[in-house]
Image (spheres, helix red, strand yellow):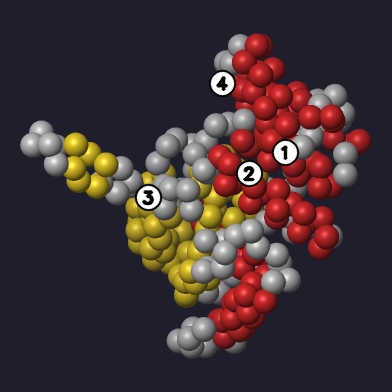
C-alpha cells in the first residue's frame, strides 16, 4: 500500500498478514489423559496467499485450522485473523438436503439479513462462478460428489470472508475429479483474491496448489519445514516441476514419520 506523506513523498506500508500465529499451542483433555496436539506454532500467512498445511494423519493440521476458524480456542499463544470471521469448507459438503443448491448458497446471506433481491443477485453470481448456474433448482442428492463440493464452495464464498479455510475438501473424490476441482479452485482464488489455507496429507496436491507449503511434524504438531513453490501457474499435477516438488515433500514427510525431524528436504 502506497502512502502519501505531507511533504509530498511516498512510502510503502506492507499490509498486515491475513493470519498471524505466535507460540500457539493446544492441549486436549486433562490430567494424565492430556494430549499436546500443537506446540509453539509460529506462522504468518500473507493476504492473498494460497498456503497448504501438509502432514501425516494426527499431526494437528485440522486442529490448527479449527483454531484459525474460531471453532476452538488455543491453550496458549497468540492468533490474529484480519478481515473478520473466516469461511470454512470441510471434506463433507454438509449441504442441507431439504434445500436446493440456490437455497443452500443463499443461507449465509439470509443469516446476515441480506434482502431477497441481494440474495438472488449474489447467488446467481456465485453459481456462475462455480459453474452450477444450470443446477440452481437441484437438491444435493441430485448432484455428483464434485458438484456438491462446488456448491459447498459457493456457500463458503457467500460469507464474503477474506480468508477461506479448506480441510481436505477433495480427499473423498477420485483422482480425475480432484484434478478438475484443483483447476476450478485455482481459477476462483485468482479471481477473488482470497487468502486460502488448505489442509492436505497429499504432497502432490500441495505442490499443485500452493504458493507455500508448511510441513507439520507428528504429534505434537510443530512447523517442521517450509517450502516456497516457485512453479509458474497454471500448473498440471503431472508437470515435471510439480512432480519433483511432490517428491521432496514426500521425502520430508517420511523423515518426520521416522522421527528424523532434523533432516533437510
Q: Position of residue 255 (x, y in %)?
A: 57, 85
Helix, strand or loop at disc 4?
loop
Q: Residue at left 46%, top 59%? A: 26
Element under label 2?
helix
**Res 103 seen here:** yes
Q: Is residue 2 above or below residue 175?
A: above
The residue beneath circle 2 is 188
Task: Tell me if 57 is positioned left or right of 149 in this view.
Answer: left
Which dot marks residue 112?
4
The CA span between labels 4 and 1 is 22 Å
First reached walking from the N terminus: tag 3 or tag 4 = 3
| Mark nearer the viewer, 3 or 4 | 3
Q: What residue is rendered at 53% in x and 55% in y?
A: 50
Q: Which mark is residue 130?
A: 1
Q: Earlier in the sequence, mark 2 or mark 4?
A: 4
Q: Residues within 10 Å of mark 1 (few under 14, many from 20)?
A: many
The image shows residue 249 at horizontal and vertical percentages of 59, 77
Disc 3/disc 1 C-alpha distance (Å):
27 Å
Residue extending furthest left?
A: 7
Which residue is situated farthest in the front direction here? Answer: 8
Looking at the image, which residue is at 37% across and 50% down? 17
Give the mark, 3 or 1, whose residue is nearer the N terminus.
3
Marks 2/4: CA distance?
Answer: 23 Å
Amino acid at each position: 500500500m502506497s502512502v502519501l506523506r505531507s511533504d509530498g513523498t511516498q512510502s510503502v506500508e506492507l499490509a498486515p498478514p491475513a493470519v498471524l500465529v505466535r507460540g500457539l499451542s493446544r492441549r486436549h483433555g486433562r490430567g494424565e489423559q492430556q494430549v499436546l496436539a500443537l506446540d509453539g506454532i509460529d506462522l504468518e500467512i500473507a493476504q492473498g496467499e494460497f498456503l497448504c498445511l501438509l502432514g501425516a494423519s494426527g499431526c494437528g493440521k485440522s486442529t490448527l485450522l479449527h483454531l484459525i476458524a474460531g471453532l476452538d480456542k488455543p491453550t496458549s499463544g497468540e492468533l490474529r485473523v484480519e478481515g473478520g470471521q473466516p469461511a470454512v469448507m470441510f471434506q463433507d459438503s454438509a449441504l442441507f438436503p431439504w434445500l436446493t443448491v440456490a437455497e443452500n448458497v443463499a443461507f449465509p446471506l439470509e443469516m446476515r439479513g441480506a434482502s431477497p433481491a441481494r440474495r438472488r443477485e449474489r447467488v446467481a453470481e456465485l453459481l456462475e462462478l462455480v459453474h452450477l448456474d444450470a443446477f440452481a433448482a437441484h437438491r444435493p442428492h441430485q448432484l455428483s460428489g464434485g458438484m456438491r463440493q462446488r456448491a459447498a464452495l459457493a456457500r463458503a464464498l457467500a460469507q464474503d470472508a477474506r480468508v477461506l479455510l479448506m480441510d481436505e475438501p477433495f480427499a473423498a473424490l477420485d483422482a480425475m475429479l480432484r484434478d478438475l476441482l484443483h483447476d476450478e479452485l485455482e481459477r476462483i482464488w485468482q479471481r477473488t483474491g482470497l487468502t486460502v489455507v488448505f489442509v492436505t496429507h497429499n504432497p502432490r496436491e500441495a505442490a499443485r496448489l500452493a504458493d507455500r507449503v508448511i510441513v507439520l511434524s507428528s504429534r505434537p504438531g510443530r512447523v517442521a519445514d517450509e517450502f516456497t513453490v516457485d512453479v509458474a501457474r497454471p500448473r498440471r499435477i503431472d508437470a515435471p516441476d510439480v512432480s519433483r516438488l511432490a517428491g521432496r515433500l514426500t521425502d520430508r514427510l517420511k523423515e518426520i514419520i521416522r522421527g528424523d525431524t532434523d533432516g533437510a528436504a
